[in-house]
Image (spheres, grey):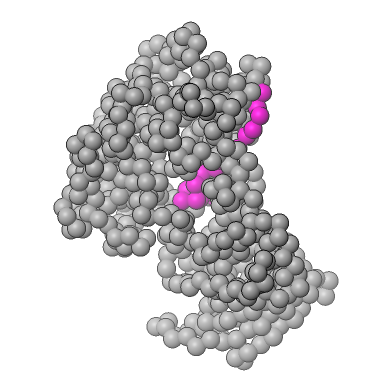
Amino acid sequence: MIPCLLFEDEHLLVVNKPAGMNTHAPGPFAGEGLYDWLRHREPRWASLSIVHRLDKETSGVMVFGKTALANGSITAQFAERTVRKQYVFLTDRSPRRRGLIVKSGIARAGERYISSIHGQPAETRFCCADFKFQISNLKLIEAEPLTGRTHQVRVHAAENGFPVLGDTLYGGSEFSRLCLHARGLILRHPASGKEMEFHAPVDFFADARLALRAALIDAHETDAFRLVHGASDGWPDLYVERLGSFFLSRSERPLHDRQKEYVRNLMAGASLFGVPFSGGSAPGEPGKPAVPLCGTELQTGAYHKILKRQVRKIAPAEASPLLVLGRPAPDRFVVRENGIQFELSFNEGYSVGLFLDQRDNRRRLLTGHIAADFSLFNSELKTQDSRFEVLNAFAYTCGFSVCAAKAGARTTSLDLSKKYLAWGKRNFVLNGFDPAGHDFIYGDVFDWLRRLAKRKLLFDLILLDPPTFARSKEHGVFRVEKDYGKLVAAVLPLLKTGGVLFASANAAGWSPEKFLAGVEEAIHSAKRRILRRHYAPQPPDFPMSRAEPAYLKTVWLRIG
């Protein structure tokens, strides 16, 4: 269940779209729009169709078709103008009268739209609503667009002297978000013909960045995610994550007063996502569940990590984050991600034990649903007589391995660190899996890939998520941009025909196009064929923008 879901049946999916998310992806390597995110999330949503759109910064009710009948019916209803759309917005200007009907043609003019005799006909009804709030100069306006032109409500409101608050493109005053919301939608059900009404409330004064996370992340299943992603969320050089009952911020320098106050406000919103903090938990004994730290007493604290470039030359104690607000965390504590438990620690150096930007990719392992047209478990590979074999190279604390084990696979986790492999075994135990049923190999990845190939071992899935830079005695220096092709070539002899390769790289300066070209060149050079491909961008809580470009590149490939 996703929090923004309003209604679903055989034919329709209705959601409350958060502000700040496109209806669909604007490009092949951009962040997913809501349509893409939904379609690639659940097999039953693989055939979703867009029947209408909302602007990126507009929130509210959206309907998607799930069947050909629904697509045809809803599209026809929009075309015939029998669908009733109810919008509300805030403005700090006063309309000339309480009720107003605006008719004009709307045409594109650069990044904006304007009323023009050469444009498409558009009609909008406006009405001032009763609205009492402490900011007395704000007016709540109800709008009913009788047509469906791009930016129609925004254009008609602005050109009649009451632009939407936050809509600086059309002369509105600056605000923390564009205060336009699709509050309601009335249509006929495509199968029964029954009239259906869908409504979604709005709080224009809530933090839109947090509202986006709350709309997409089920806090009952996941309590570890990014709350603030740098400049994309309006906070350059500040990254904040919720990790269970604790918070972790990162920047290149100590928190200044305004940043610290914002983190303090995040901590104060303990029940922000509808699920109050439980007090956190510490790892239980092997085979037993995690135990509460202190009953129901709120145990929350904020840590801060100063980002440094020469991480490998810094001792773990110096690289570890420091407590800046609230109560200290235990040496080890547990978070949830998609229902899976992971052990984290603020005392183990630069990383806390889980890379949150891979959450959606780990979920793909849990569900076996890579994308709308891409199932992980090929029926020809997974039979009753053989288990699905997974090799997780650069396994770190074995997050991918645990999810694969949950899906029924047998895993081999390979890493250069004994400490992290031991940590990974504890993650297996946390989730009720016996590590003895899986392999954990310590050593240089390239060396072990050669050894495994000599043993003629084959895997259904190979996971590659290497560090940007690594050094080992056996192989020397590994640099992700320079050596990724060699890594792909080294694993291909271990991948079954028809098997799946997951390739990931954390390199901000490496374009997605060059990353994919390097991976695919290595595959073609090995005389292998790519049967299916799905490029998975950063998850929605790691939004991309011009000010904060994507750094993570991930692709799933079925290879013949």
147 to 359, vertically: above or below: below
Residue 19 visible? The answer is no
Please tell me which residue is depicted at 61% across the width and 44% down the height of the picture.
372
- Residue projecting furthest to the left: 294
| Dominant secondary-structure state across the stretch colored magenta | loop
Image position, residue 64 (x, y; %) = 62, 60
Please tell me which residue is depicted at 31% across the width and 27% down the height of the picture.
435
Quadrant of residue 424 in the image? Answer: top left
Image position, residue 70 (x, y; %) = 68, 61
- Residue projecting furthest to the top: 454
Quadrant of residue 258 in the image? Answer: bottom left
100 to 338, vertically: above or below: below
Residue 181 or residue 41, whichever sits in front? 41
435 to 184, vertically: above or below: above
- Residue projecting furthest to the right: 118
Residue 496 or residue 122, whichever sits in front? 496
Residue 285 visible? The answer is yes
User: Which stretch did the figure color magenta?
Assistant: 529-545
Quadrant of residue 106 in the image? Answer: bottom right
Q: Is residue 237 magenta?
A: no
- Residue projecting furthest to the bottom: 97
Image position, residue 91 (x, y; %) = 54, 79
